[in-house]
Image (cartoon, rainbow, N blue to C red):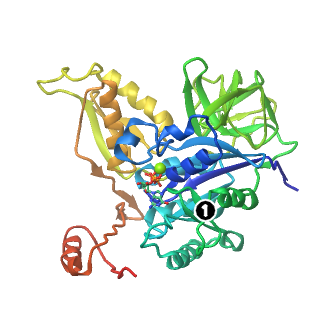
Amino acid sequence: MTMRRTDIRNIAIIAHVDHGKTTLVDAILKQTHVHRNIESMGERILDSMDQERERGITIKAKNASVVYKGVKINIVDTPGHADFGGEVERTLRMVDGVLLLVDAKEGPMPQTTFVLRKALGLGHKAIVVINKIDRPDAQIEDIVNRTFDLFGHLGASDDQLDFPIVYTSALQGTASLDPEKPGADITPLLDTILGKIPPPAIGQDRPLQLLVLALAHDPYKGKMGIGKLLSSTLTKRQALVRIKTDGTLIPGKATDLLVFEGLERKEVDQVEAGEIVAVAGFPEIMIGETLADPEQPVPLPPVAIDEPTVQMTFSVNTSPFAGREGKYVTSRHLRERLYKELETNVALRAEETDSTDQFLVAGRGELHLAVLIEAMRREGYELQVSQPKVILREADGVTLEPYEELTIEVPVEFQGPVIEEVGATCSSSTTSRPAG
Ligand SMILES: Nc1nc2c(ncn2[C@@H]2O[C@H](COP(=O)(O)OP(=O)(O)OP(=O)(O)O)[C@@H](O)[C@H]2O)c(=O)[nH]1
Ligand SMILES: [Mg+2]
């Protein structure tokens, strides 16, 4: 029999870009009063990185937690842009269920399919959240039907198909179980989380195991590995072993333990299985490694992340203006920065080339690479980059090319020229559907 601890729920919020994930987290944080200054923190609180604020999108997955009716809910907000799907893939291993947000007007979109496929594949139960029901052009019934079809199409089990639906306006901070009656606050969603997301299973009598799925840096405690404790109890200063992905064992101890409390991390002396925890004491820890009991070191399967689709070369600036913009200009600087990035940016690849001044960097899309380049420039790195190139792959004698789905919404009178243009430049087939 599986034991579960009922005082915790671990959820990820997943969706297509802009369907309102981070705004929904705002509503949950504000209405559970996680922080005394929460009301003055503005909108999309978890989008705290400069580039997230400037671009208006989430780039990195982030943890927060709230307490509702005595239960701690660990929430991970994930990015919806396809280029950051690697963030979603690793987050899904940390949680026990998902909120799948679907925009009440747009309905399921390509990234909805991607993230739902990954979540269902891991056996997760989903709560479907139809968001933006305040939009005058919302098509709730149609969107619910299309969402149900998507679950079916992706091979959801009977249990997964039997998903609860909550209708929300994240912007207004309201949720309801009845599409006809908008709610007054977000509590119907929180009650559904408590009722429908399974509490974390805890492997009683099993040796301690924790899969590292995210990293954090602390100026005093150093690098920390973050993951869900799957079994046993973890105590501060306890001896552990770090199992690298090649099987090497590195003994050490948990010098500090931190759990997520509201928007912050809080130090604790002990953590019970089922909780998401940051463990300090292993300065070289990497995503995908297992922290385990030194007496019974059993690794967990590492995270499988989808392959990169575009690549660029990053090289030292050799132009006559070299050295004018940045303070880090050598290939050693570039190499160190790229290899540091690989530790956290799980879907990124970087390799050396024949030239010592040049590196081949591959990612999940142009934006994935553009965000890195911009971050490096702001940190003072000076570099030259090539045009991005699509990565082709040979399998069984055929050349495979990554592709994207494009959806364009236009008034019917412009449909002809748009189809013509898209057909001529990039697509192999187009379908059109009148907006209902
Ligand atoms: N009308 C309306 N707008 C909403 C609602 N929820 C979010 N929005 C708006 O939708 C836009 C995107 O919201 P975000 O919360 O950033 O969406 P997201 O899903 O976190 O986006 P990514 O993290 O980039 O994938 C913002 O302009 C929000 O104000 C809602 O319930 N109603
Ligand atoms: Mg977001």
User: Residue 254 appears at what percent x and percent y?
Assistant: 71, 24
Q: In this view, does 202 lie above or below 402?
A: above
User: Residue 68 appears at what percent x and percent y?
Assistant: 72, 48
Give 28 or 50, whichever is nearer the viewer: 28
Give 219 or 75, whichever is nearer the viewer: 75
Q: Around disc 1, counting alpha carbons within 10 Å, would you say few (fewer than 14), some (14 to 19), or many (20 or more)?
A: many
Query: Which residue is pictured at 67% across the width and 57% down the height?
Result: 187
Q: Mark 1 points at which residue?
A: 175
User: Residue 114 appears at what percent x and percent y?
Assistant: 50, 62
Q: Is residue 3 above or below residue 350?
A: below
Q: In this view, does 80 lie above or below 35?
A: below
Q: Is residue 436 above or below residue 66?
A: below
Give 121 or 74, whichever is nearer the viewer: 74
* Left or right of 287 on screen, residue 227: right
Residue type, label 1: Ala
Q: Within the image, what quadrant is residue 151 found in?
A: bottom right
Query: Which residue is pictured at 46% across the width and 59% down the height?
Result: 19
Query: Which residue is pictured at 18% across the width and 21% down the height?
Result: 324
Query: Which residue is pictured at 33% across the width and 53% down the height?
Result: 391
Q: In which quarter of the image is the N terminus?
A: bottom right
Quarter of the displayed picture in which ligand 1 can be seen? bottom left
Residue 195 visible to an observer of this rendering: yes
